[in-house]
Amino acid sequence: MAADGMSLDGHVHFFTASDLEVVAGRLPFALPVPHLLSNYLAQLAKSGVAPKLLNNVHLSVLPDSSNVFASFEEMEALRAQWPGRYDEVRLVGTIKADPTYATAERLSHPQVVGIRVVLHDAPPESISDHAYGGSDWLALLARLRTDQHVHVYAKEAETNLRVLRQIPDQIRVVIDHLGTCHPERGEDEPSYHALLQEAGRRGNVWFKGPGYRTSTKVDEVVPFVRAIIKAVSADRVLLSASDAPHVGTDNEGVGFASHYNSVSALEFCEALASSVSFATGIPVRRLLSAAADDLFPIQQKAKP
């Protein structure tokens, strides 16, 4: 794998056994295996590459995002332990999108880049017309900095669309997993087409990979990426994302963890970007990570 292909992980989860203790015995499935920042960096180091940017995204099974803030401290501890080794690694985080949890204090942290709405397989009809338009949600959205975004995850394109239409136009939005986890419906599915059209109208919506949650077959994902590019441009696509440690199953019920590790997941992203590049002429690097400059800008310190 080329070094540039692994310079960014736009969606990864870091958490410890202690983080999982609060949900032990409460989940309808086995607890995921702890995924430590130090182990992840060591695994990538074996491939010969150190990532430049990591986005620790809120893990849906956890009640809050304390693990995200803990990872910021862990990174500082690693830098102190290994002077110079991790100086070029920038760690940011996306916290839980909850009006009570995402306080002004938490959002003011310079490494927090956004909030994540997690809906999984919620059907479209479960999203009322005012689900995200109440005073508490509007207050939350008003607390976001102009460089922060709302990260929306739903397997159904129409569910994503219903949420997007309730978010004020000036708020930046990231649609997770390319907007759909149903490849069998095709990129011409009416609700998917409507989602892309709404994203194009707004002009401030990004679609994030890795792509394997849409389908583990690269050829099945390419048409969706091409449709996104046509609707919002290649600069609104971010394919480089491992989504480690790969919780959940594919459309055939096979665990993602049996398909991928942190390295092979990023290799999938590069294979997808290469296939899209071959079909469109758009550079692989641009598809993988060029959007990161807009999505994860370094917060400028206020002048004294």
Image: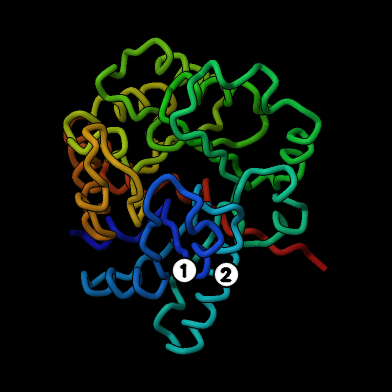
Tell us which disc is closer to us: 1 or 2: 1
Measured as percent of width and height from the top left, residue 45 is found at 27, 74
Please, what is the three-letter code of the amino acid marked with disc 2?
Answer: Ala
178 lies above or below 285: above
Question: Around disc 1, counting alpha carbons within 10 Å, would you say few (fewer than 14), some (14 to 19), or many (20 or more)?
Answer: some
Residue bearing mark 2? 70
Instruction: State the image coordinates of residue 7 (x, y, percent, origin top left).
Output: 34, 61
Q: Residue at x 72, y 25 (%)?
A: 133
Q: Quadrant of the C terminus?
A: bottom right
* Number of marks in picture: 2
Q: Is residue 91 left or right of residue 64?
A: left
Report which quarter residue 139 is drawn in: top right
Left or right, 296 with respect to 239, comes to right
Residue 217 numbered mark, or none = none
User: In the rendered structure, which amino acid carries the disc numbered 1?
Assistant: Thr
Percent position of residue 14, x then y = 45, 63
Q: Residues within 10 Å of mark 2 (few under 14, many from 20)?
A: some
**Disc 1 to disc 2: CB gap under 8 Å:** yes
Question: Which of the 4 image quarters holds residue 146?
Answer: top right
Residue in the image at 51% along x and 34% along y: 119
| First reached walking from the N terminus: tag 1 or tag 2 | 1
Give the residue displayed 35% in from the left and 57% down from the top: 245
Under tag 1, what secondary structure?
loop
Q: Note whether residue 242 is visible.
A: yes
Nearest to the observer: residue 45 or residue 73: 73
Query: How far is disc 1 from disc 2 in space, using C-alphas?
Result: 10 Å
Q: Position of residue 260 (x, y in %)?
A: 23, 53
Q: Is residue 141 left or right of residue 155?
A: right
- The residue nearer to you, when weighing 233 against 121, is 121
Mark linked to residue 16: 1
Q: Residue furthest front?
A: 25
